[in-house]
Image (tube, grey):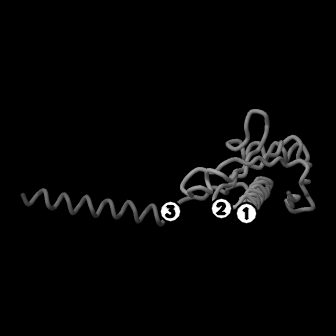
């Protein structure tokens, strides 16, 4: 297994990662029955070489992927080979951790322009007038 590079000089050493293999599901014939090609990579969030505030951010943003013991799990079974699935799982784990560490700029509230509101009201009045005229003809 390889180290994960999260950018900004943050490296997660390979010895913190734990890989588990198992048999993949789905079609594949004899290969599926014999070969353990599904790979699950686990890492304890508390063991990550990050400050506490960043660990909290990872826990918050990846809460659905972290179990009660605080272990983040990523699984891959798309490929037929174990090594390719391991690479995919490591890439995905690296990507998830990078994204969760990014600072998000707070959303700026925007307002609907007055001209747009005025046009909407005018259109409603026109539509109402058209309907009123139809009603009077009957």
Mark 3 to mark 1: distance in Å?
A: 56 Å
Q: Which mark is residue 84?
A: 1
The single residue placed furthest to the top in the displayed view is 68
* Picture quadrant of residue 67: top right
Query: Relative to the observer, which residue lies in front, 116 or 93?
Result: 93
Q: Which mark is residue 114?
A: 3
Going from the N terminus, do you reach mark 2 or mark 1 first?
2
Please tell me which residue is depicted at 46% across the width and 65% down the height of the picture: 116
Mark 2 to mark 3: distance in Å?
A: 55 Å
Residue density around tag 1, few if under 14, some if 14–19, many if 20 or more, within 10 Å: some
Mark 2 to mark 1: distance in Å?
A: 6 Å
Identify the residue under disc 2.
Answer: 79
Residue density around tag 2, few if under 14, some if 14–19, many if 20 or more, within 10 Å: some
Question: Mark 2 and 3 residues: CB-CB less than 8 Å, in contact?
Answer: no
The quadrant the C terminus occupies is bottom left
Left or right of 33: which side holds 95?
right
Question: Mark 3 and 1 residues: CB-CB less than 8 Å, in contact?
Answer: no
Q: Considering only vertical position in the picture, is 65 above or below 2?
A: above
Going from the N terminus, do you reach mark 2 or mark 3 first?
2
Q: Considering only vertical position in the picture, is 123 above or below 23?
A: below
Disc 1, SS: helix
Total label count? 3
């Amino acid at each position: 297994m390889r180290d994960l590079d999260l950018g900004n000089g943050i490296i997660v050493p390979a010895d913190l990662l734990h890989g588990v293999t198992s048999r993949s599901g789905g079609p594949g014939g004899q290969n599926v029955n014999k070969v353990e090609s599904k790979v699950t990579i686990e890492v304890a969030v508390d063991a990550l070489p990050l400050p506490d505030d960043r660990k909290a951010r990872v826990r918050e943003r990846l809460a659905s992927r972290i179990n009660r013991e605080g272990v983040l799990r990523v699984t891959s079974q798309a490929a037929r080979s174990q090594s390719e699935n391991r690479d995919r799982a490591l890439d995905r784990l690296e990507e998830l951790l990078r994204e969760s560490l990014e600072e998000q700029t707070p959303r700026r509230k925007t307002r609907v322009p007055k001209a747009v509101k005025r046009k909407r009201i005018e259109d409603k009045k026109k539509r109402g007038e058209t309907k009123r005229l139809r009603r009077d003809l009957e």
